[in-house]
Image (cartoon, rainbow, N blue to C red):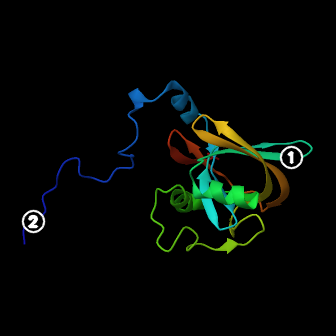
Amino acid sequence: MFPVKHQPGAEIHHVDPFATPAGQRSPARRLRGRLASPVTLWTAPGPAGLTVSSTLVAEGEPDRLLGLVDPEADLWAAVEESGRFAVAVLGPAHRQLADRFAGLFPSPGGLFALDEWVETPYGPVPADAEGWAGCRLDDSRECGWGLLVEGVVETVTLTDDGDPLLHHRGRYRELAT
């Protein structure tokens, strides 16, 4: 047996080695990074799911929910086929779940193999979600490199007020109390 020698720089860091270096990022990308965003999980019958931090609720008659999703994601194919989707609000305890559905964490057995899920007509939602909305697909169009998906909110289920999980400057954050 040979002793293991420490190699400087061989530590595990919480930095994405594939990320575009800060000096090479577009000004719009840098601006987006400075806007705190809610971390949500979008799901659809199939099931399919995707972590989405570009989500907005627009009150009105009817209420609408909008988000930017990857047009090549399995989620979009499932939403397009079923015409409906669920959007769950994630909290600080959902960091690993958010990474799994973002493709940043392994998911042996599939994305839905872990955790407890509640089956809904709009897609499965985490049993411990802070709340969720069931939406009917109304419109979609290209927007930047993503797809702007617009849904009509048909149902909302909320639990006790919990703190949301936020995404800011490439990292998860929690509200300071």
The kind of residue on which mark 1 rests is Asp
The reply to whether discs 1 and 2 touch (Cβ–Cβ < 8 Å) is no
Picture layout, residue 55 above or below residue 112: above
> Pointer 1: residues within 10 angstroms few (<14), some, or many (20+)?
some
Taking the image as shown, residue 153 lies to the left or right of residue 74, namely right
Q: Residue 162: name its quadrant.
A: bottom right
The spot of residue 30 in percent (x, y) is 51, 30
The kind of residue on which mark 2 rests is Pro
In this view, the residue in front, 40 or 65, is: 65
**Callout 1 secondary element:** loop
Q: Which residue is mark 2?
A: 3
In this view, the residue in front, 22 or 73, is: 73
- Asked if residue 91 can be seen in this view, the reply is no
Q: Which residue is mark 1?
A: 63
The structure residue drawn at horizontal position 86% and vertical position 56%, both measured from the top left corner, is 154
The structure residue drawn at horizontal position 7% and vertical position 67%, both measured from the top left corner, is 2
The structure residue drawn at horizontal position 60% and vertical position 56%, both measured from the top left corner, is 50
Return the residue found at the far right.
61
Indicate which disc, 1 or 2, sits on the residue closer to the N terminus. Answer: 2
Closer to the eye: label 1 or 2 = 1
